[in-house]
Image: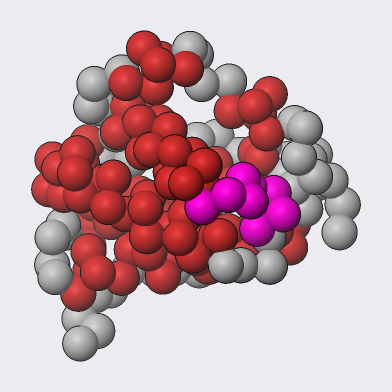
Amino acid sequence: MQFSNIDFSIQPYVEGVNPPVTKPNPEFLQDIGEEGMRDLLRRFYTKLYESPINHLFPQDFDEMMTASQHSADFFIQICGGPKYFNQNRGAPQMRGRHAPFAITPTARLHWLTLFEEALQPIIEEQRSSDANIQSFWNYLNVFSQWMVNSRD
């Protein structure tokens, strides 16, 4: 059942332009909880593992699930939760962490499409408001632009 009014449109990538990033509403994390965030990232990384951009990620499934937990730590932190990422991995510095990987505008589109799919159970189960999910999507949309570092 599709009930939401969330706009999952993807902002076009413009080389050399880094739009301002707005963190997601903290209420998104409050609504789904830390375990809900971890579930979201497990779903997302499982999709990535089977995707056309899986070469950018660990090839071992257990390592991929470990990466999903690091990512969950980051998103919990960015949504106003405990600073698990900083405690376990140091300052995020995500552009630097992604620099070794050729992230193209097309890879960004795959990444966002898979994230939208991973968000669907939260939407279908009405685990957060449209406004809070939209704020999370808006963050992903801009954050992903900052990660592009290669041309198609």
Judge whether residue 139 can be spotted in this image: no
Q: Quadrant of residue 98?
A: top right
Residue 128 lies in the magenta-colored region: no
Q: 14 and 103: which one is in front?
A: 103
Q: Residue 36: give x, y in percent of width and height.
A: 20, 49
Quadrant of the drawing holding the N terminus = bottom left
Q: Which residues are magenta?
A: 54-61
21 horizontally vs 95: left or right: left
Relative to residue 108, is residue 51 depicted above or below?
below
How far across and down, in percent of the image, does residue 66 sit? 44, 38
Tell whether 152 sits left or right of 38. right
Residue 15 location (% of width, % of height): 80, 46
- In the rendered image, the quadrant that contains the C terminus is bottom right
Residue 60: in magenta span: yes
**Residue shown at 73%/63% (left/top)?**
106
Residue 32 visible in image: yes
Q: Nearer the viewer, residue 15 or 147?
A: 147
